[in-house]
Image: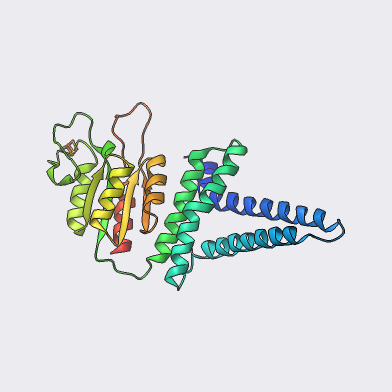
Amino acid sequence: MKEQDQYLSVIKFPAFVSITLIILSAVYFGFLYHALQEPGLSTSQTLIFGLLLLVLLVLVATWVATLMSTHIRLKARWMRLLSRWMLVHVYYPLARFLATVTFSSKNILIESYLNFSNETVLTDQREISNSSILALLPHCLQKEDCTVRIGTDIISCEECGGCDIAKIKQLVSQQKVDAAVATGGSLAKKLITERNPNVIVAVGCHRDMVDVVRDAWIYPIYAILDERVPGAKPEAKVNLASIEFAIKRFK
Ligand code: SF4
């Protein structure tokens, strides 16, 4: 990744959300200023401006708390859940909207969003030992012509070393961590609900990671993007050090 892309993959998401909130505030106060030029606001206008101000204040206050949650663990559980819900259902769509209207790279925005989300999860889980961690893996890590039927469990991998599944199998068994393989977003959600872990270390492509983080937002999910090298093997690769780092941090 180029140095500029690396920088953007950290700063882009928080910058886009902040810019969008500044634009929304400017639009609100622009309309309010215009309305106040008229001789007095009607009751319905007062109500609408009051409600919009309330929404704006909630958006800004929760965003400030969410920014803080990358460094400071929010004390109240309801605040942590609200912040996570807003991150997934409000702030990401806002940043996505700005990326669309500015023709900005969506993949870099997703990387930045996941980096940001991972920081909040690491802070949230700081000094917490989890009894159950689920390593959620995509099927595309398996070698294309592997004859072993993996299903949702990597236990059947014969560890021939043909793909990253072998090393992940060794890692999760050393660390005594549960692992599951999902072929798509709905299966991933089903596996998460069934196994109900304390924390998830998920691997996948950009789109799958956004879906999993959104669908299972109630769970702390540390997302790791898989890697596809153009012209190389058809199966995806993953940085094993990132998986090991996350598992050890959450244990
Ligand atoms: S390591 Fe070998 S046996 Fe295991 S999934 Fe990959 S190719 Fe198949």
Residue 248, image quadrant: bottom left
Vertical relation: 229 (above or below) 28: above
- Residue depicted at x 14% and y 47%: 155
Q: Is residue 216 visible?
A: yes
Q: Residue furthest top?
A: 231
Q: Quadrant of ligand 1?
A: top left
**Residue sitting at 35 percent across and 26 percent down?**
231
Q: Residue furthest bottom?
A: 75
Kindly identify the residue that appears in the image at 50 percent across and 46 percent down: 9
Q: Residue 5, position in %: x, y?
A: 52, 42
Work out whether residue 171 or residue 181 is closer to the camera in this orientation and state it: 181
Number of on-image labels: 0
Q: How is the image coloured?
A: rainbow
Relative to 65, is 157 on the left or the right? Answer: left
Residue found 24% across the figure and 62% down from its top: 132
Q: Is 68 positioned to the left or the right of 194 in the image?
A: right
Q: Quadrant of the C terminus?
A: bottom left
| Residue 55 on image: x %, y % | 61, 60
* Residue 200 appears left or right of 54: left
| Residue ranking furthest to the front | 43
- Left or right relative to 186: residue 150: left
**Residue 229 location in percent, x, y?**
37, 32
Residue 73 seen from this side: no
- Compared with 25, 80 (above or below) is below
Q: Position of residue 157 (x, y in %)?
A: 14, 42
Most foreground residue, 247 or 40? 40
